[in-house]
Every structure is written in C-alpha cells, then in structure tokens.
Amino acid sequence: MKKFTRPCLQFALVAIFPVVTLAQPETRQNISPEKKSELKPAEAAPTPFPYHPIGSWVGKRFIFLPKPKGSESGTYEDFSRAVSHQKYARRVARVVSADDSGASAYIEFEMEDDGERLRVFTVANKESVRGMALLDDIENARKQWAGKTVWGKMLMISSYDEQSGAITMTQVKKFGPLKVVDVIPGWDEEKPARFKLETPDGKQGFVDLNLSGTNVQKEVRHVSRFEDHLLAENPRLKYKWRADVWSAIEKGQVYPGMTEEQVKMSWGEPDKVTRTAAGEVWTYISGALVFKKGVLSGSQ
C-alpha cells in the first residue's frame, strides 16, 4: 500500500510525495527538569477567548512582553517616547483611553505600579501595539489549563537557553499527551501566550499561541490558535480508528482508503478544495490528494 508522508520542515523532504509539516515549531524558553507528575486530562474543550477591538480596551490590562537574549536593549516601538525593554518588560499597564475611530488609533496607558502615563499612536490601519499582550488571555489560560493534559498536533516543541540565547527543538509524539506546566507571557504580540509543556517521559519545552486575537493584526489573527496546535481531549478516545490508521497519522502519512477526517488529522486542513464530478481534490503546498465519496483514492 503506497503511503504519502508529510515530513517535518526541519528534516529533508525525501518522501514519495513531498509535502510540508503540519505546523511550524515555536521558540521556547529553557526549563530545567522537574519532578514528573501524573497527567490529569482536561475536563472540557477550551472556551473561545473573546476578541477585543482597540475601541473597547478602556479598563483592560496589558503586559509588556519580555524579549530574548540580545534584544533586551531595544525599545517598544509604537510609543510616543522611548520605552525600553529593559525597564518595562513584564510590567502591567491599564488602558485609560482608546480611540480607533480614525485610520490610526490613539491609546493611553497608565502603569499599575507607579501611575506613569504612556501614549501610543499606531500607524494607519494598524490594529495592534507591538510588544504588548492582553493580560486576561494569559491569566485565564493559566486558570483553564495549568496542570491539565492536552494532546499536541505538532511534532516538535521549542527550547530556549536563557544564558546562551540558543533555541533548540525537541521532538514529541504527535497527538501524544502533554502536561501544561504553566502559561506565561511569550515574546510576540501575535502569539503572546507561552504554554510550557512536559511529556510523560519528562521532556520539557513550549509552544507560543494566540488565544483571543486581541492586539493581533487582522492578516494573522487566525494563525497560531490553540486548536491549530493542541487538543483538549484525547483524540484516540474520541476517534475509534484502527491501529494502522493512528500509526500513519503519528508519522504524518496518508494512504488510499483513509477518510477526509483522518487525512486532516495527519496533514491538516488543505490550502484549497476543488470539487469535480468525480469527487474532490485537496491541494497542499507541494501536492494534491484526490477523494471519491469522502475517501482518499490517490494523489495528483
């Protein structure tokens, strides 16, 4: 039986039918090994976090995101005066006024610890302030997932060594269980919630996610969402598929006879779907799959 593999981008594309990885690995902070603890399944699927446009920000709290080694001497760029990473990282500010009625948005923040006022004028049609994140997203994610088990769609998690600034990758089992050790601020406003994860054998790393889309520009607001990288329930309990099907999914493979849902679990959503008289053609970046009556019949 011919199988088509969708390998990870970090490795050579040597499969019969070359394709791309399910998801890009994220950067990660170095986490020293801790005593392994029992994995508890999450009790419910994640609740969608509400999106807040700039005009509704008054009263909301934002955190200045930390930066990796080598970037600490920079500044948060959108402010009306110099606001340094070194001085403001991890501090919290509350929005006291916000106006996005024009092409540019005007936002005024008040620092919670000393009452200092900071002002932002965004460039035309810009829907975010660089280097900041809605604190509710991070705090609510920690309350919902810390100590729970999720199941990862990705093949790699990231590591970051704070001393050297080196970023490395750790391979994990696709759809294997991962304990959420904590949720902390990440580095980037486009994916500001850093999920610190631990595998059953004690490997640790993280994935950075975008939860509500708040303070994320429209063009990338749909990217790096929780559901793109993690599942809140064990898919093997939800889908009673044969062992050979799950084996192929874990390896990023598909083969004729698999259903549309099984193919999506292995390769993700297609970039394009073309309907024909005979069925459907699912197009991915480096190839296409042909379906007849909802079942994979071959490739193009």
Image (tube, rainbow, N blue to C red):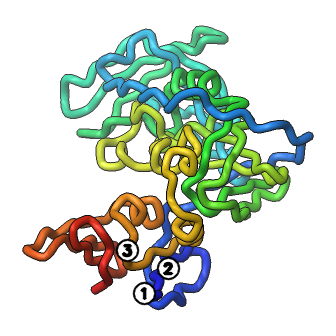
Residue at 43% over, 23% down: 119
Judge whether residue 87 can be spotted in this image: no
Horizontal placement of 248 versus 36: left or right? left
Return the disc, 1 or 3, that comes first in the chain's sequence: 1
Q: Which residue is mark 2?
A: 5
SS at mark 1 in the image:
loop
Residue visible at 58% across and 44% down in the picture: 234
Expressed as whole percent of the image width and height from the top left, the position of residue 207 reads: 61, 49
- Residue at which label 3 appears: 257
* Real-space Cα separation, disc 1 to disc 3, in angstroms: 17 Å
Labels 2 & 1 near each other (Cβ < 8 A) = yes
**Residue denoted by label 1:** 17
Q: Is residue 276 above or below residue 178?
A: below
> Where does residue 157 sit, x and y in percent of width and height?
67, 56
Residue 135 placement (x, y as % from top left)? 55, 23
- Residue placed at 49% from the left, 21% from the top? 118
